[in-house]
Image (spheres, helix red, strand yellow):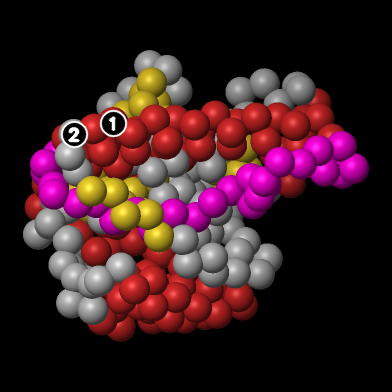
Amino acid sequence: MVFSSGFFGFFAHAGFLAALRDLNIRSSGYAGASSGTIIAAMAASDMSDHTIREILLRLKKSDFWDPDPMPFILKRALKLFRGYSGYLRGKGFARLLEHIPIKQIEDCPVPLVITATNLTLQREELFTRGSLTKGIQASGAVPILFKPVEIDGSLYVDGGMVNKAPVQALADLIQPEKIIVHFIASDNLEGPSNSFLKKKMTPWHIHRLAVNISRQEAYQRQCDVIKQRGIELIEVRTNAPGVDPNSLEKGPSAYYKSREAGIKILANKGF
């Protein structure tokens, strides 16, 4: 089971995990990128749906929103932000991860692989051992928003930057017969369009679109490799409402809609 990256998509991922369990579908391995890593880790740690739901649906912005003091940011601004690596310190995020009972990736009852972007060595990094909390933090450190996470001398950011849904990594880890991907599509990849030209800050939208196209193409190439190896790939898109730090009240809706849609889609596929 692979949970893709997707900004604050963990509500929808958790709902889909609940759908899998409602249908008594048990995974022999999990993988995740960015927000998907949180749910992959919770699932691999054998946390109950009730516990996962309670943690997520109680989430408040103040639980993880820990920016640097404004005077510090202003001082960095005067130096053109030289050496400044991110807005949020990540300590609040780390505290939330303390709810996960397993501390080392290799101790998870079900195999788990986490993807992150190694800035120092300029490559993708796959974690199957080591600190589970650090691995999740690294995979979820959205550039600019969060400061990079340091692990063994290297700085890491969001795994979804280089691998939106690590299907090949999971296939290499456990050699499965089939892989289910709960895929959260980037919101600006909705079909051919030049609508970005009509938006404010057009250069930023062009850059963001180009990055998302690159990630989508890389994911499709992975899928092709997996299919050539004889592994059945089942991609599911539940299209739950998007959530961001300022709209956490949409979280319950994303969870339950993803759960409901997941049950219907999987049932139609014969599960």
Nearer to the camera, 7 or 25: 25
Nearer to the camera, 124 or 198: 198
Residue beneath the point at 74% across and 46% down: 70
**Residue 225: mark in rendering:** 1
Q: Quarter of the image holding residue 129?
A: top left
Residue beneath the point at 34% across and 49% down: 32
Mark 2–mark 1 Cα distance, whole angstroms, equals 6 Å
Q: Is residue 57 visible?
A: no
Residue beneath the point at 87% across and 37% down: 197
Give the amino acid at mark 2: Arg
With 57 as the anchor, is 177 left or right in this view?
A: left
With 67 as the anchor, is 134 left or right in this view?
A: left
Q: Tell me the SS state at disc 1.
A: helix
Tell me residue 99's x, y (percent).
Answer: 30, 68
Q: Tell me which segment is drawn in magenta.
A: 173-199
Residue beneath the point at 23% across and 48% down: 232
Q: Residues within 10 Å of mark 2 (few under 14, many from 20)?
A: few
Q: Is residue 81 visible?
A: yes
**Residue 229: mark in rendering:** 2
Q: Are the residues tagged 2 and 1 within 8 Å (C-beta)?
A: yes
In the rendered image, residue 240 lying in the magenta stretch gets the answer: no
Q: Tell me the SS state at disc 2.
A: loop
